[in-house]
Structures are given as C-alpha cells and as structure tokens.
Amino acid sequence: MKETKKIYFASDVHLGAPALNNNREREILFVKWLDQVKDDAETIYLMGDIFDFWFEYKRAVPRGFTRVLGKLSEITDSGITVHFFTGNHDIWVFDYLPTEVGVIVHRDIVKTEIRGKKFFLAHGDGLGPYDKSYKLLKKIFTNKFLQWTFARIHPNLSIWMAHKWSSHSRLRDGKIEADKYRGEEKEWLVLFAKDELKKEHFDYFVFGHRHWPCNIDLDGKSRYINTGDWITHFTYAVFDGKEMLVKEFDQTIK
C-alpha cells in the first residue's frame, strides 16, 4: 500500500432526479471528479443516493447513467476498490452493480479501520431514534414480498410512479434541507454520533443523506463528517491517512 494514496468519500448525486433539469451536466461533473480522484485513490466510498431512483428487474435496469457506470467499471477494473452504500433513494440495488460494475454493495452501517483510524460509515438514513418517518418507509421498501410485487409491474409504469414520488419529495426545491446547519442539538446525525461514542470510540463518523457538507469536532477526539451533495454543493471528503478534509470540486475543470 502506498502512503501517498488517498481514501475518497462522496454521496447524494441523485442522478436522474425528475425534479432537477441539469442531470446530464451533474453526471458529467461527477464523472470528471471520479476521473480526477482515480489517479491517487486507494479506495472510493460512495455513501448513498448516487441514483435518485434505482430498481433492478431480473433482466433490466433503469435507463441512463452510462457515463457513471462506465467510469466506475473502469475504476474497479484497474484494481481500485469502490464501496457503494445504498441510500433511501437507491435502496433497490441488488446484484447488477456488484456483478457488472464491480462495486462492493453495503446495505447497513460499516465499522472499519483505515490506516489505524476507526471509521463509522453509513448513508445516514434511519439511524438511532431520530429518523422515525423513514424507519417505517424502510421497512416497506425492504419487504421481500413488496419488492417482488413491484417487480411484476411493467418498468414503464413502475419507473413513472417512482419519478412521480420523487418529484414530490424533499428534492423538489433542489436542496433537501441543505439550506443551513441547525446546530448540534438539532442535527440528528450529530446526536446519533454522540450516542454511539458513549458505547465505542470512533475517530470519524462519515455520512451522506443530510446534503450539508461539514467537518465537526464531537469530543476533541472524534469528528462528524458529512460529504454534502452534488446538487448545490458539489463536495466530497478525502482522508490522506493523517487528516480528513471536506472539499468542493472545481466545477471549472475541463
């Protein structure tokens, strides 16, 4: 392992979001970022909601995203490990992405050690007692019988239904609550991280979901990192083995 290699984290690209009119431009930017970071990446963590909607039929997958899928395939083929966390929008990833693209799919939290530092990794939805409304939706979305039933619907109708649902979600204003930081006592992912620290030490908690990029000290020894999004902020996190930074992608890169 080369110490000059870095670990990258990104989330919440929401490719194909029907509420947004710049999906092609955002996909191209995200591919440019992937193309840039692959030069010194040891591992890339995609922390959820890369797609605004994804459902795999046995013999079909959603139309589009060819630039991102192709670039991810190129990256994994080169030997770089790519971890893909399912978010609340792309929860219905099954075997296509790991089989065809080569990513490692995670459907739950991951506790891991990277270069001697302990990491707590998750998309961020439904954690602790703070996201009660989504907990119910997640039970519905992960129900095997309901997934089987949905798969019986023709893709033209099912994807239309999903896009109608998404167009009435929090994304309809293009922000998804990314307007401001609410403070430690109201940010439920910060509260969740503090609760976890009472049970076990972690150097870094890394989440997406919230769409608000930040790097917050929790207790002098641990930090809460949110990777932000690729809708309004175009941000990501990078760990070089010594420190964790949240950066904004230079959108002027040709």
Image: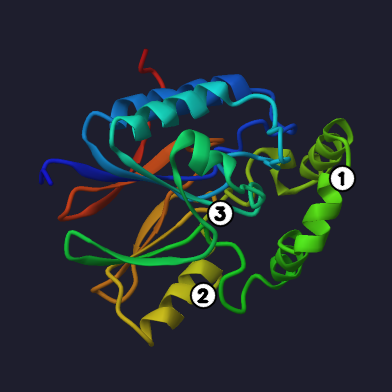
Q: Give whichever of 228, 44 is nearer the camera.
A: 44
Q: Which residue is mark 3?
A: 209
Q: What residue did someone put label 1 on?
A: 152
Name the disc covering residue 185, or none: 2
Number of marks in the rendered image: 3
Q: Position of residue 8 (x, y in %)?
A: 32, 44
- In the rendered structure, the answer to whether residue 27 lies left or right of residue 112 reads right
> Relative to 121, is 91 above or below?
above
Q: Nearer the viewer, mark 2 or mark 1?
A: 1
Locate residue 144: give its quadrant. Answer: bottom right
Q: Earlier in the sequence, mark 2 or mark 3?
A: 2
Q: Image point 54% across, 26% down: which residue? A: 26
Rounded to the nearest angstrom, the CA distance separating label 1 from label 3 is: 29 Å
Q: Residues within 10 Å of mark 3 (few under 14, many from 20)?
A: many
- The kind of residue tagged 2 is Glu
Name the kind of residue labelled 3 in the image.
His
Question: For numbered disc 2, what is the local secondary structure?
Answer: loop
With respect to residue 121, does 55 lie above or below? Answer: above
The residue lying at 53 percent from left, 62 percent from top is 124
Say which element carries label 3.
Answer: loop
Q: Earlier in the sequence, mark 1 or mark 3?
A: 1
Residue closest to the far top: 254
Position in image of residue 52 (x %, y %): 66, 40
